[in-house]
Image: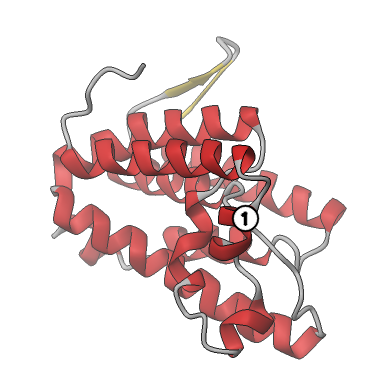
Amino acid sequence: MFPRAQSEFVTRWLFVTLGASIFSVLDGGWLASWLSFVPSKIFHGQVWRLVTWPLIEASPLQIVLTCLAIYKFGGELAVRWGDRRLRRFVLQIAIVAAAITLVLAALTGAMYMRRVGGWAVINVLVITWARQFPNAPLVLHGMVALSGQQLINVTIGTTILFALFTGPIWMALDLVACFAAALYPRGWLRR
């Protein structure tokens, strides 16, 4: 299916995301209901949901795009950083995004919202890749080449546009993940 990634972590991440997403479709959504981000359930002790929400994708297009992003951007970051550092970074961003969204949900009464995957994984990887490889162009559909800060701005701008249409609380995981990746201390990225 995929050419083997140079990173064991990226390979496992791909297969877990792909496998969990497909399984959640075949099981009628049972797995997604247990791994999704639901603030009320997290407040009732189901803390694993702080890190499992990015592992399930809800649509075929989203599965494909997420797996491609993990392979391309995650693979290149793993080569530069190593598996351990990439895993730590991804977990930090997922937990920060979930924790801040949890607080926002409590403050706005959105305790029963249910989110999985989304664009957060893609956004974090694209922004981080653009920060690590600021001169490397990313060509979108053969029409537009973006690199560095341009790519970060387009990624954040697109996420904000989606938030305007679907609601900022609904998109809070994605928004917080974007800003966390964009504002992640530069010195920590270079270590």
* Residue shown at the point (37%, 49%) measured from the top left: 128
Quadrant (top left/top right/bottom left/bottom right) for the C terminus:
bottom left
* Residue shown at the point (35%, 69%) measured from the top left: 92
Three-letter code, disc 1:
Trp
Instruction: Say what secondary structure mark 1 lies in.
Output: helix
Question: Which residue is at the far right?
Answer: 165
- Is 122 rendered above or below residue 174? above
Q: Position of residue 84 (x, y in %)?
A: 15, 56
Q: Residues within 10 Å of mark 1 (few under 14, many from 20)?
A: few
Q: How many marks?
A: 1
**Relative to 59, 87 lies left or right:** left
**Relative to 132, 146 lies left or right:** right
* Residue shown at the point (60%, 89%) measured from the top left: 43
Q: Nearer the viewer, residue 142 or 36?
A: 36
Quadrant (top left/top right/bottom left/bottom right) for the N terminus:
top left
Question: Which residue is at the far front?
Answer: 27
* Residue shown at the point (13%, 48%) measured from the top left: 82
Q: Position of residue 74 (x, y in %)?
A: 31, 40
**Relative to 161, 85 lies left or right:** left
From where the camera sits, is residue 33 visible? Answer: yes
Question: Which quadrant would residue 167 be assigned to in this image?
Answer: bottom right
From where the camera sits, is residue 134 visible? Answer: no
Q: Nearer the viewer, residue 58 or 6?
A: 58
- Is 48 rendered above or below residue 117? below
Question: Which quadrant would residue 71 be assigned to in this image?
Answer: top left
Q: Position of residue 175 (x, y in %)?
A: 62, 61
Colour basis: secondary structure
Residue denoted by label 1: 30
Q: Position of residue 7 (x, y in %)?
A: 17, 37
Question: Which residue is at the far top?
Answer: 142
